[in-house]
Amino acid sequence: MLNMTYPVLIFMLAPLLWKQKIKALAVFYLLLTMTGIYLVIRPDFSSIIPGDLLGLMSGIVAAFAVITLSMAREHDSTVIIVFYLMAIGFITNGLAMIPVFTLPEGIQYFHLVASGVFGAAGQVLLTMGYKSINAKTGSMISSSRIVFAALLGFLIFAEPLSFSIIAGGLMIVGAIIGVSRLKYR
Amino acid sequence: MHKGILFLLLAEFCFAAATVFVKFITNSSAIPAIEITFFRFFIGFFLSLFYIRSGNISLKPHRWSLVI
């Protein structure tokens, strides 16, 4: 839940970075999105653990990543941005992976490649999308990942779809439909 | 539907689909998360490099600070 807080951070930073006014309707959709995320994930806030702090930090990092991606997209093409992102990730993850590398076996190669292809395709599409929409709108639409994950979890792993998940998913979808009717840039 | 929103929805579906395969891996092996992430960057790096080389596109970005 905490690493999904970045739409809130982007909304808070937007007036400072882009001198954008925040529409009341956009704030409503943001609240609807965050409520939907809460209902789908149902996090346990009864005790705070160090991992929670990391989750919040990853939300802050994600907010800055989305902001810089949105800004970079105004000057450079999708392929150049994706290339440098992948190059940096390739080198840093490659170095960090060496001490813990585990040789995959059989079907695991397919799963690794499929995960990599979908992840890379997602990054390309994300970068293409930010050409024509702003960081605020984009960050809210990104919450659709939770809805897709819940649906795929239900279809592939037979994970239960509770009333809370369905209600939260509908709220996120409703917020996305609403925000898609607002002005994008 | 606005093109940008469609791209982002497709992107998020791809990320969710990637997570499905990650779950298959973590359910059946001790392959660390950093190795799974590495494969994403590895594939993305070589695909984008191939596209850049085949299209004779300059590797020099207009705004280094934002890209890096």
Image (cartoon, coloured by chain):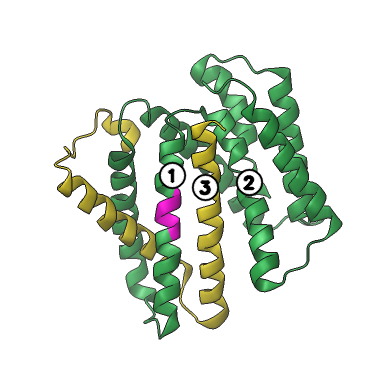
Q: Are marks 3 and 2 in contact (CB under 8 Å)?
A: no
Residue at image position (41%, 85%) is A106
Residue carrying label 2: A144
Residue type at mark 2 is: Ser
Q: CA distance from mark 3 to mark 1?
A: 7 Å
Residue carrying label 3: B10
Q: Are marks 3 and 1 in contact (CB under 8 Å)?
A: yes
What color was chain B assigned in the picture?
yellow
Upstream in the sequence, badge 2 or badge 1?
1
Neighbourhood count class around disc 3 (C-alpha, 10 Å): few under 14, some 14–19, many 20 upward? many
SS of the residue at dot 1?
A: helix
Magenta segment boundaries in residue numbering: A118-122
Q: Would you place residue A11 above or below residue A120 in this image?
A: above
Residue at image position (65%, 52%) is A146
Residue at image position (29%, 46%) is A83
Query: How far from the left and from the top, in percent, is residue A56?
Result: 62, 46
What color was chain A assigned in the picture?
green
Q: Residue furthest right?
A: A163
SS of the residue at dot 2?
A: helix
Can I make out residue B37 in this image?
A: no
Does mark 2 fall on the same chain as mark 3? no
